[in-house]
Image: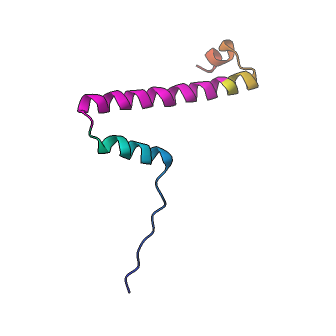
Amino acid sequence: MTQIASNPPLSNVQLELLKLYATGVSDETLIDLKRTMAKFFLDRMRKSADMVWEEKGYTDTQMQAID
């Protein structure tokens, strides 16, 4: 008996990217998209780190002392 592996459904992001790529994009556009997504996630991580920084009451002096 053959068993069929079930894969989880695609995420909302995966579905949107598949729609975009189905139209075909140039290599230049793909590079721009990668940069845009990288910047988006970098900005989100920075905001998250800033929130932790403020919650913990860290200072520049404390961070320089770690070096």
Q: How many marks?
A: 0
Tell me the quadrant of the picture where the N terminus can be found.
bottom left
Q: Residue at x 29, y 29 (%)?
A: 29
Q: Nearer the viewer, residue 3 or 55?
A: 3
Q: Is residue 16 above or below residue 46?
A: below
Q: Nearer the viewer, residue 34 or 58?
A: 34
Residue 36, percent from left and from top: 41, 27
Tell me the quadrant of the picture where the C terminus can be found.
top right
Color style of the picture: rainbow
Quadrant in the rendering for residue 27? top left
Q: Is residue 42 above or below residue 15?
A: above
Residue 39, percent from left and from top: 46, 26
Q: Nearer the viewer, residue 33 or 65?
A: 33
Q: Which residues are magenta?
A: 25-50
Q: Residue at x 42, y 71 (%)?
A: 5
Q: Is residue 9 magenta?
A: no
Q: Residue at x 56, y 29 (%)?
A: 44
Residue 58, percent from left and from top: 71, 20
Residue 33, percent from left and from top: 37, 31
Q: Residue at x 49, y 61 (%)?
A: 8
Give the overall secondary structure of the magenta segment: helix
Q: Is residue 26 left or right of residue 49?
A: left
Q: Is residue 20 above or below residue 33?
A: below
Q: Is residue 21 left or right of residue 56?
A: left
